[in-house]
Image (cartoon, rainbow, N blue to C red):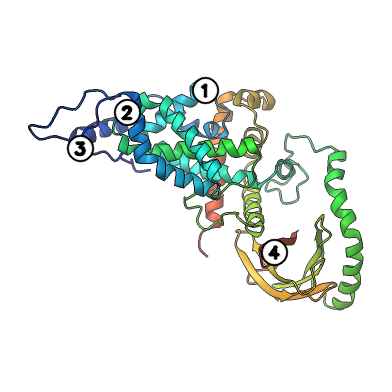
Amino acid sequence: MAPVRMIVTGADKSKRGEIMETNQHTGPGHDELRESLGLYLSGTLDPAEERRVEAHLAGCAECRATADELADVVLLLPNLSNDDMRDLLTPDRPESPEPGHVAPFRRPSPARRRGRMLAPLLAAAAALVAIAFAGGAWWNGSYGPASRPVSSSTSAGATASVEFPIDRELRLVVVGLRPRAEFEVIAVARDGKPHLLARHQAIGGPQRVVAETPVPADEIVLVIVAQLDGTVVVAVPL
Amino acid sequence: MTVSGGAPCSRGCPTPPAFESADERMKQLYDLHAGPVYRFLLGLTFGRRQAAEDLLQETLLRAWRQLDNLDSDISTLRPWLLTVARRVAIDAGRAQKARPTVVGDVDLSGLPAPDNPVDRLIVAQTLRTSMAALSPEHRRVIFELYYMGRTAPEVAALLGIPEGTVRSRAFHALRSLRASLTASESPE
């Protein structure tokens, strides 16, 4: 990374600024302090070491830039809950990039898992009956290779089932929309890009949507049904 | 360093004092930077004024503690103040278990600020994908430090690795995560 000079005004200060930058980049402790930035941002350094890092940041533009970059990542972390993270640590996670690896972390207790799963399952049960009925008739004869419906629900009782009978053709059945409420179907690709697939007005009862997807089916990781005001009705992770 | 930061003066100007008091420097720092730092924090807190004011106070408190280590030219300190302000916001978010915070003003190129539920879901999904791409060792250290709030010595003892390894993994895990997040945002 190119060295970054501090902005200083006046000849004397400019010279002093250069010296300060040089000393910070080559002086003892720079590499160690730079590597401490992860701990600094976690808030777990002891106060003395934290002050040492902040003092270093005052004179090292390179470390400041790195700290800012890492801080932006840390600011995103609350978007995943502790349970989300635990799931990512469990060895039976199907999308694990290290097949066969056994993460050194105990699985959540069965009781906790039941607690997380039970409410949405119960809420979904009645709606799934309706979906199975409506969808079964609708899908008749249209299944493509290796595609099976994936369902999800919310505690508020909304339920959706997503299927790709053929590549790039999404079929959705959603229950729980307010009659006449306008809603959108959004597919989120693996790269995080959202794609608006459809916008409709709910007719009451199971709502069925067929939409072409701009990316292959196996690139889609999440389907969201949302009202136009941004309220999420239901999200289906794939 | 507490050398005076006065402008160059032609003959006849009064000689500035060799040293400014800490109070004078803090006043100068406040006058020059409090407004922009506050506006930056307003962005981080989705416009919550009280929260932004609290974070500004904490940021200025840290500046006060570091005053002797800061450049005597107060006008140059804004980048450092913004770096510290980010860290203060992270602490506050962690303390409140607030979710989510924000992307910030920097280029996580196009990752949407999660100010509505749909964007929030999308950011969460993107983060989940990027997190899954990390090595299990990096994921584990992020979990213990940032989600469980364990200190480096505690994580080292828990995982049976040296404390320096925890430090190194925390740094490189965040860098990898950022690389993955920004790569997922690159244009098609």
Q: Do the residues labelled 4 and 3 touch (CB within 8 Å)?
A: no
In this picture, is A238 found above or below B34?
below
Task: Residue A68: give x, y in percent of width and height.
Answer: 47, 42
**Decide: marks 2, 3 in contact (CB < 8 A)?**
no
SS of the residue under disc 2: helix
Q: Which of A229 and A112 is in front in this view?
A: A229
Q: Report how far apart the C-alphas of labels 1 and 2 lie in the structure.
A: 26 Å
Callout 3 secondary element: loop
Identity of the residue furthest to the top in this view: A48
The amino acid type found where label 2 is placed reads: Glu
Residue depth check, mark 4 versus mark 2: number of the one nearer the observer:
2
Residue type highlighted by circle 1: Pro
Of callouts 3 and 1, which one flags the residue occurring earlier in the amino acid sequence?
3
Q: Mark 1 points at which residue?
A: A47
Quarter of the rendering occupied by the N terminus of chain A: top left
| Residue position marked by numbered label 2 in the rendering | B24
Q: Which secondary structure class fits the magenta region best?
A: strand
* Alpha carbon distance from label 4 to label 1: 48 Å
Q: Mark 3 points at which residue?
A: A10
Q: Quadrant of residue A13?
A: top left
What chain does mark 3 sit on?
A
Residue A122 position by quadrant:
bottom right
Q: Provide the secondary structure element on which disc 4 rests.
A: helix
Q: For mark 4, name the chain.
A: A
Q: How crowded is mark 1: few (under 14 residues within 10 Å), some or many (20 or more)?
A: few
Image height of B24 relative to A134, above or below? above
Q: Which of marks 1 and 2 is in front?
A: 2
Q: Where is residue A65 in the image (x, y as percent from the top left)?
A: 42, 41
Query: Circle 4 sits on which residue?
Result: A218
Q: Mark 1 lies on which chain?
A: A
Q: Given this view, does label 2 or label 3 mark the residue nearer the observer?
A: 2
